[in-house]
Image (spheres, grey):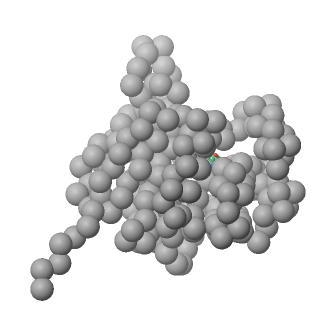
Amino acid sequence: MNDLMKEMEIYAAEYDIPIMQKEGIEFFKDLVKGNEIYSILEIGSAIGYSAICLASLDPKIHILTIERDDERYQKAVENIEKSGLKSQIEILHADALECEIEGLFDCIFIDAAKAQYIRFFEKYEKNLKDTGIIVSDNLSFHGYVEHPTDSMSRNLKQLVRKIRNYIDYLKNNEKYDTLFLDKGDGLAISRKKKTNVIE
Ligand SMILES: C[S@@+](CC[C@H](N)C(=O)[O-])C[C@H]1O[C@@H](n2cnc3c(N)ncnc32)[C@H](O)[C@@H]1O
């Protein structure tokens, strides 16, 4: 498994594929182990790196992961085959904003187009168990969110604005408590607030 992970890291670096950073994935693994997370819906598989990392933690973990890009999807299918974890990882070749997913998950992992994070959150929160968590990656976006520079392109500025909007959206979302962590490229963990039922 270590050889495959290394191979994927080299491939991602060579073809400029944004897989999770080491510190982020190590933190995520601990989060999964410590919170009895056995079902994960991942938005954005890329080449299957994070899905394989997480599924390899425990044979009871099942992951449904969605990727819209043709080449990355094909590569992810290949890597999942090589990992021997096919029975634990189901990959869908689709645009996550256009498909419908059924069932409830312990964790929803948002790691796709940064400009669409609010839409992913609102579309998929219905698939989250009451005790579940939504994990969002890249909220620091290589440091640009906290430290924007004048030389940033217009597109990059716009993307940074969208990520900031998402951070504000999470902070102001009264249904969730969100923890922002300076891990990897910036992670947020959102947990549904417990509602007090008075009988
Ligand atoms: C940051 S990469 C995912 C990395 C992966 N989670 C990992 O750490 O190994 C984001 C991926 O999301 C995909 N993506 C972006 N928007 C999407 C959408 N609407 N539906 C499905 N996939 C999407 C991109 O093609 C890209 O491969």
Task: Point out residue 98 in the picture as x, y percentages from the top left corner.
Answer: 55, 66
Give me the residue at 39% from left, 68% from top: 131
Task: Please identify the residue farthest to the front as the structure is shown.
Answer: 34
For the residue pair 131 and 97, the one nearer the viewer reads as 131
Give me the residue at 57% from left, 67% from top: 38
Give me the residue at 30% from left, 58% from top: 176
Task: Please identify the residue farthest to the left as the structure is shown.
Answer: 199
Q: Quadrant of the C terminus?
A: bottom left
Q: Is residue 51 visible?
A: no
Please tell me whether residue 28 is drawn above or below residue 149 in the rendered image: below
Task: Point out residue 65 in the picture as x, y percentages from the top left corner.
Answer: 64, 62
Q: Is residue 199 visible?
A: yes
Please tell me whether residue 48 is drawn above or below residue 81 in the rendered image: above
Task: Point out residue 139 in the picture as x, y percentages from the top left corner.
Answer: 45, 38
Task: Point out residue 103 in the picture as x, y percentages from the top left corner.
Answer: 52, 78
Please tell me whether residue 164 is drawn above or below residue 78 in the rendered image: above
Q: Left of 111 or right of it: where is 157?
A: left
Please tell me whether residue 31 is drawn above or below residue 105 in the rendered image: above
Q: Left of 37 or right of it: where is 173?
A: left
For the residue pair 171 and 4, the one nearer the viewer reads as 4
Q: Quadrant of residue 84?
A: bottom right
Task: Please identify the residue farthest to the bottom as the structure is shown.
Answer: 199
Give me the residue at 59% from left, 50% from top: 29
Q: Quadrant of residue 79?
A: bottom right
